[in-house]
Amino acid sequence: MPASDARLKVLTRAEIQRRIALGLPPDSDESVLPRYRHPPERMPTPAAVLVPLVNRPDGLTLLLTQRTAHLHDHAGQISFPGGRVDDEDDTRIHTALREAEEETGLHRRHVEIIGQLPEWDIQTGFRVTPVVGWVEPPFELAPDPFEVAEVFEVPLGFLLNPENHRRHSDVIDGRQRHYYSMPWEGRYIWGATAGMIHTLYRILNR
């Protein structure tokens, strides 16, 4: 049995919530790629995404979206549902739930919030709070065709297997950038989304 499958057998909702509350392990992992950080003079735009763990009969999955090709920010990329914080949003949780419902049709009554991952700076100027939600089927989706080209799920076991975490280093706009990718069934999960998944892996692997 792969190590990722063995770990999944003990990852109940309560156990996932407990490990998220503990945060990243304190030990230094030299294999972890350096993360982009906004310079001190930059005022990032606050945003939040929902990291939806779907409790399927065959095992947990992560729900992801592929953005439409015409969007201004992150066009065509695979991402968690989410977006910038609006003035009426009381918390990042509110933002994540609202955006997920607007983008995918996933109603918040199906989502139990079980924690938050560390904030993530994105080069396009956002500071994103990943909000982890436990989703119990059945539920219906109605993706917004303007923003979302596709909604799909990836087995959590695949994403928790470090053998599927590819590392990259490129020079972009004259600056060295490091990022992960996790290709799955013809889809290319990369950048901040893959980085958040890698963070989730480190937290759940502790």
Image (cartoon, rainbow, N blue to C red):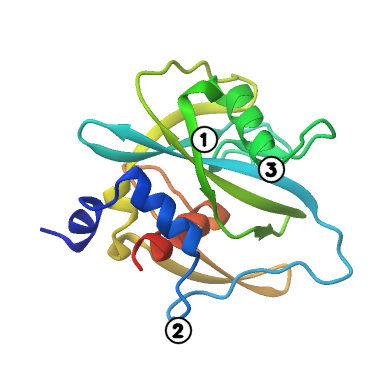
- Give whichever of 173, 47 is nearer the camera: 47
Image quarter in which the C terminus is found: bottom left
The answer to whether the residues at label 1 and label 2 have Cβ atoms under 8 Å apart is: no
Image quarter in which the N terminus is found: bottom left
N-terminal of the two: label 1 or label 2? 2
The structure residue drawn at horizontal position 82% and vertical position 30%, both measured from the top left corner, is 88
In terms of secondary structure, where does tag 3 sit? helix
Mark 2 or 3: in front is 3
N-terminal of the two: label 2 or label 3? 2
- Compared to 77, does 26 lie above or below? below
Residue 66: mark in rendering: 1
* Residue type highlighted by circle 2: Glu
The structure residue drawn at horizontal position 44% and vertical position 48%, both measured from the top left corner, is 188
Query: Which residue does the numbered mark 3 point to in the structure image?
Result: 92
* Residue type highlighted by circle 3: Arg
**Horizontal arrangement in the rendering, residue 166 relative to residue 121 (left or right):** left
The structure residue drawn at horizontal position 35% and vertical position 23%, both measured from the top left corner, is 137
In terms of secondary structure, where does tag 1 sit? strand
